[in-house]
Image (cartoon, grey):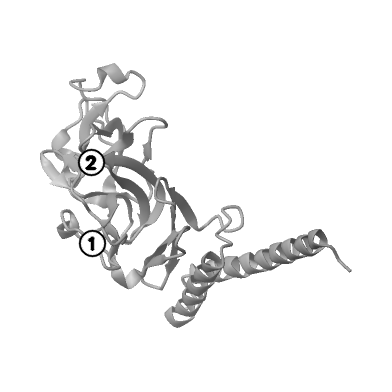
Amino acid sequence: MRSWKTIGLLLLISGTLLGQTRYGQLRAWHQESLMANNGDEKNKAYADSLWFGIQELVEIGMGISVDSLPSISQVELKGENKVLLSWLTRNRAAFQSWGLIFDKKTMKIWDFHPNEAASLSDPSILKKMLSGGKWPGMLVYEAVAFKRKNQTLFLLIGFFPGSDNLNYKHIDVMSFDKAGSPVFGSRYISWEGQKIGRKTFRYSAQASMMLKSEKGEKRLVMDHLAPASPELKNQFAFYGPDLSYDALEFNGEEWIMIPEVDLKNPGQDQGKPGKVQRFGPNIQPRRDNSAGNK
């Protein structure tokens, strides 16, 4: 007769092998769902299979292994006992974003579908709050927790590969209502005199934008974006970093945008002269703030 230890070990091995098999299947589905030449119907079938497969793993308590599924972004929502998963698929026209929030205590899932995603290219969503399944569709790669009046909120940082030679980086404030459901776009960001709940940055797909939190500090730092030349203002496919930096700092009440921060000498942040622009053929001696990404 087998001991309980032996049975437990066999169950563990069996579960591990099952998980590895399942991960392999999910990886294959995800890879196929990102192929542009499959056709929309086939890609949708792979995307749906991936969606249900991820939900199944989460519901049975296996979670998602970052190493096994590196293309699925997974961020902890600290203080809420929840995890936010997000990933991309595509059809022939564009990429699509999917996501879910899983409450590890209650086992509840809030899911986010592409057809409920607000377009990051739409300036009208700047001050809108999104709930009831509507969300800012993106691949979330960081969630910065902050407290305000005994409520835990999160500053989400994400990426979305756009069309027309554009990419997007995005910041969004997420909170939870009294029923525990996620709400996006609470207006706790002060950006150039405006109270907003989200900020989108549009830039050339050939460029790369830094946008991240600083470890141990309630501050986000980011590349300032500018056009390759003044006549290309508001043509965001020609925007990229100009070698100067901006920041968002939390003051206990809201996140304040601070222009022209000095990452090497923080004490010299405000009032520092503009820096040399080196993106594109026309180098400007000082940064023109009017040319920044609005």
> Where does the image place residue 191, in percent across and percent down from the top left?
17, 40
> Where does the image place residue 148, in percent across and percent down from the top left?
25, 41
Q: Number of labelled discs?
A: 2
- The image shows residue 124, relative to residue 269, as above or below, that is below
The quadrant holding residue 161 is: bottom left
Badge 1 marks a residue whose secondary structure is loop
**Horizontal relation, residue 176 to residue 91: left or right:** left
Observer-side mark, 2 or 1, equals 2
Which circle marks residue 130 in the picture? 1
Task: Tell me the quarter of the image containing the N terminus.
Answer: bottom right
- CA gap between label 2 and label 1 equals 21 Å
x 21%, y 20%: residue: 272
**Horizontal relation, residue 217 to residue 89: left or right:** left
**Horizontal relation, residue 60 to residue 115: left or right:** right
- Which amino acid type is marked by label 1? Leu
The quadrant holding residue 216 is: top left
> Where does the image place residue 169, in percent across and percent down from the top left?
32, 49
> Where does the image place residue 55, in percent across and percent down from the top left?
49, 69
**In this view of the protein, which residue sits in the foreground, 134 or 171?**
134
Determine which residue is flagged by label 2.
Answer: 149
- Which amino acid type is marked by label 2? Lys
Using a 10 Å C-alpha cutoff, classify the residue at mark 2 as few (fewer than 14 neighbours), some (14 to 19) or many (20 or more).
few
**Horizontal relation, residue 280 to residue 26: left or right:** left
Earlier residue among tags 2 and 1: 1
